[in-house]
Image (cartoon, helix red, strand yellow):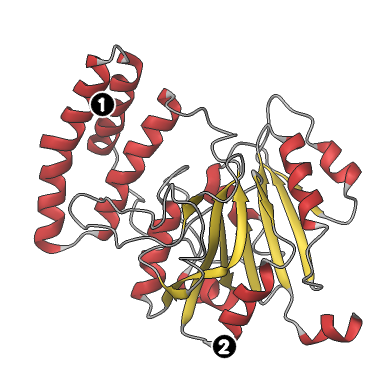
């Protein structure tokens, strides 16, 4: 095992905990069973206000445990652990996942075989509905509507997406990225806080000349939306805000103008009215607040932060 460990590159695994220590411990239990022999684990507690995250370090004393002073969001929480990481590859993976024992080898082997690949995500199944796809790659993001589709979503897995191929974007629940790519391109921008930051990052990595890949030989099970309440004003605000922010940062030329008109004259009013018609005035307000945020925020929105080494 030691010789095999030396022959395989070190992978630094980063996961973020927020008020979900029990879920994070379940995740770490699944990581203990993986066959890849050369990893280090970073758990970042994102200033959990209603949790006792220290039990994670108590139960798994071998992990690198980092506590932030405030909630830094998805990108910020992950970014904290990158400077001390020593891996050739960084695995960003949600704490609300559980993994198959052999999930890591195919992704590492893919990156080892092709230095032009900048990111790779595995096949994702829903944890509570086994053998059901959440993700088998993405279609490209439309530069005007900022919409894309998860390939295979809701389908039963019959092996139809066991291939390895390029994909339109990455899936933030599990993504393996070479450290050298992060050094070159920068880390995820923290202005998103939640949602769309991984798509934005993938777009910048593609612009730097790298490819984004889906690895259908790897499997991760996703419990999804444990740390945020689905269809809550919090979620809808950041989803809407992130979608518009992605357009502002990545659409160019005539597409940028068309996207601005589409979002502000069609998508936002239509979505807000739809929620209001269902009696969800809280969600309608969240959509409008997200739109207003963009009219009042203009500085510091358009760069990727450079990696700061320890």
**Image quadrant for the N terminus?**
bottom right
x and y percentages locating residue 256 in the rendered image: 15, 55
- Density class for disc 1 (Cα within 10 Å; few <14, some 14-19, many ≥20) is some
- Real-space CA distance between mark 2 and mark 1, rounded to the nearest whole angstrom: 47 Å
Q: Is residue 268 left or right of residue 210?
A: left
Residue sitting nearer the eye, 290 or 220: 220
Against 17, residue 33 (above or below) is below
Q: Residue furthest front?
A: 158
x and y percentages locating residue 181 in the rendered image: 52, 75
Against 50, residue 242 (above or below) is below
Q: Specify which label sits upstream in the sequence, 2 or 1.
A: 2
- Dot 1: element: helix
Numbered badge on residue 113: 2
- Dot 2: element: helix
x and y percentages locating residue 254 in the rendered image: 9, 60
Q: Are marks 2 and 1 in contact (CB under 8 Å)?
A: no
Q: Could you tell me which residue is drawn at 30 percent across and 20 percent down? A: 285
**Image quadrant for the C terminus?**
bottom right
Numbered badge on residue 288: 1
């Amino acid at each position: 095992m030691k010789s095999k460990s030396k022959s395989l590159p070190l992978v630094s695994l980063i996961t973020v905990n927020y008020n979900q220590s029990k879920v994070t411990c379940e995740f770490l239990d699944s990581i203990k069973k993986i066959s890849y022999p050369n990893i280090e684990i970073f758990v970042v507690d994102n200033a959990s206000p209603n949790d006792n995250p220290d039990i994670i370090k108590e139960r798994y004393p071998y992990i690198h445990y980092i506590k932030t002073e405030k909630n830094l969001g998805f990108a910020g929480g992950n970014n904290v652990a990158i400077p001390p990481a020593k891996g050739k590859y960084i695995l960003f993976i949600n704490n609300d996942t559980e993994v198959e024992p052999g999930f890591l080898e195919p992704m590492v082997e893919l990156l080892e075989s092709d230095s032009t690949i900048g990111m790779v995500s595995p096949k994702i199944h829903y944890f509570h509905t086994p053998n059901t796809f959440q993700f088998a790659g993405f279609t490209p993001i439309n530069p005007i509507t900022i919409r894309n589709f998860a390939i295979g979503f809701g389908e039963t897995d019959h092996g139809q997406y066991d291939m390895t191929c390029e994909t339109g974007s990455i899936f933030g629940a599990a993504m393996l990225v070479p450290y050298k790519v992060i050094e070159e391109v920068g880390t995820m921008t923290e202005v998103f806080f939640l949602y769309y930051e991984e798509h934005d990052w993938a777009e910048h990595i593609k612009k730097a000349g790298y490819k984004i890949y889906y690895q259908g030989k790897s499997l991760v099970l996703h419990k999804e939306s444990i740390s945020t309440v689905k269809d809550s004003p919090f979620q809808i605000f950041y989803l809407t805000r992130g979608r518009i922010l992605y357009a502002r940062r990545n659409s160019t030329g005539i597409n940028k103008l068309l996207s601005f008109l589409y979002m502000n004259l069609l998508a936002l009013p239509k979505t807000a009215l739809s929620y209001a018609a269902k009696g969800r005035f809280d969600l309608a307000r969240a959509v409008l607040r997200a739109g207003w945020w963009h009219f009042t925020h203009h500085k510091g929105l358009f760069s990727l932060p450079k990696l700061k080494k320890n």
